[in-house]
Amino acid sequence: MSGLKVLSVASEIFPLVKTGGLADVTGALPGALKPEDVVMRTLVPAYPALTAKLDEVSIAGEYSDLFGGPARVLAGVAAGLDLFAIDAPHLYDRPGNPYLRPDGLDWPDNAHRFAALARVGADIGLGAIGGFQPEVVHAHDWQAALAAAYLHFASGFRPATMVTIHNLAFQGHFPLSTFADLGLPERALTIDGVEYFGGVGYLKAGLRLADSITTVSPTYAREIMTPEFGMALDGLLRSRASVVHGILNGIDDAVWNPAADAALPQNYSALRIDMRARNKTALQSKLGLTPSPDRPLFAVVSRLSQQKGLDLMLPALTELVAKGGQFALLGSGERALEEGFAQAAATRAGSIGCVLGYDERLAHLFQAGADFIVVPSRFEPCGLTQLCALRYGATPIVSHVGGLADTVIDANDAATAAGVATGVQFSPTSDEALSYALNRARELFHDRATMRRLRLNGMRADVSWRGPARRYAALYRSLAGTA
Ligand code: ADP
Ligand code: GLC
């Protein structure tokens, strides 16, 4: 079997540029696929943070005009990842968040910035770079999805295409006038092409035209075909149901390994789970919480957005604290939520702590120190924090949606009797159901034997990339006709 070549096209990649789980996935996939004999290189924009880390650089391609300025495609290695980086200063030489201006608004030229990413991805697919002819072009989310459209409308040989939906809420929907700049043929502007509600839809185009569509959990794959979760694309997705696959994400078990995690004051494993307690004390003291092994510590590590349902957590805090619990939050995002949690921490110091911001290291201490990680999402394509929680022996409390439903086994009577439960699930995503779940968790916490079992089951669950990588590899091979 010879190595199958895949070009992954993405707007972020861990550990170089990350705003969420998308980066974790694109950063982990190439390594996870190596044992499957898949050679993956990733095309990304050369943002300043990425360029600064790029080594072994060579020029692999040049454009005299890529959406308004000259550009080069750099081949190089950063953080152990084989990359092609689009060096186009007029598009990407901007510090900070890859999508937003410093004032928090989208960059006004995002339609061009990410059409350029897709265009270059398609060109590499068409053989633009000597020595790397991908058999599959795998585009992630709306920022890369147009690559499938460029390849669909190209003539002659083209590689197979796959679009992965990490989050259907972000669609890349732009005014019709954008179309003229895309360099696609007129016939692409139809309902079966890039046209979308009177404008241009990048994700829509990718989903219409890719050979294969994946999303990041089996349950989300079903949900997005319903009006409730389909965000106006459910009809299109239903019409393509035969090529839609749900493949769960994993987590990188080298990055997330409690036995060797340098961010923790105390390493531990399932065999030495009692040693975990020191991390709880460290987390409590870091967040200004009263150090106490006997109070259940509930925690959240999250973007603060409507998707994550954390507005439901705020009113639940009064009862949680009244019943002896503690709460810690690490998050950033919507201002009203940031203010709400800051206010709650200020009025109940010792019981509620909050760190507003993005802190990768602290996220590890949260996972190692919390008793419970709460993820009350309204929708969740996969979710990674509950996977980290399982691996770190923090028991997840999750709403029954998307990947949360697929990765946590509720501690109901049957699962507990069978000894397989790993957490607490609740449904629907509502105040009452969340409050009920938090109370159930608190009762579990005081049942030491059951709690220990839950933690150990979680730590022993396979949340690695091994299974998912096999599924991606099999799908690439069947797409490339080499299965
Ligand atoms: P999403 O991509 O929708 O935000 P995921 O659960 O898939 O949700 O991935 C979130 C990733 O971002 C995880 O790796 C999580 O640990 C990390 N993360 C989220 N918020 C923070 C934060 N404030 N500080 C550090 N890491 C965070
Ligand atoms: C998105 C989703 C999240 C998923 C991540 C990686 O950000 O919101 O559920 O885990 O992508 O696929």
Image (cartoon, rainbow, N blue to C red):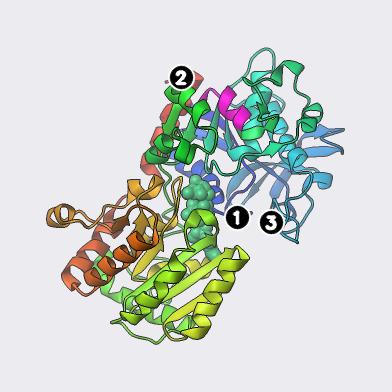
Q: Residues within 10 Å of mark 3 (few under 14, many from 20)?
A: some
In this view, 33 is above or below 263: above
Q: Does dot 1 land on a helix, a strand or a loop?
A: loop
Q: Residues within 10 Å of mark 2 (few under 14, many from 20)?
A: few
Q: Is-magenta flag for residue 291?
A: no
The quarter holding residue 241 reads top left
Question: Disc 2 or 3, which lies upstream in sequence?
Answer: 3
Q: Residue at x 67, y 26 (%)?
A: 194
Q: Does dot 2 land on a helix, a strand or a loop?
A: loop
Residue 147 appears left or right of 91:
left
* Residue tagged 2: 482
Q: Do the residues under discs 1 and 3 have CB atoms within 8 angstroms?
A: yes
Q: What segment carries the magenta color?
A: 204-212
Question: Disc 1 or 3, which lies upstream in sequence?
Answer: 1
**Ligand 2 within 8 A of label 2's CB?**
no
Q: Which amino acid type is marked by label 2? A: Thr
Q: What whole-number distance in Å separates the C-alpha atoms at marks 2 and 3?
A: 39 Å
The quadrant of the rendering that contains the C terminus is top left
**Secondary structure character of the magenta stretch overall:** helix
Q: Does dot 3 land on a helix, a strand or a loop?
A: loop
**Ligand 1 within 8 A of label 3's CB?**
no
* Residue tagged 1: 19
Residue placed most toward the observer, 279 or 427? 427
Q: Which amino acid type is marked by label 1? A: Thr
Name the spot of residue 148 as percent of width and height, x first. Answer: 62, 26
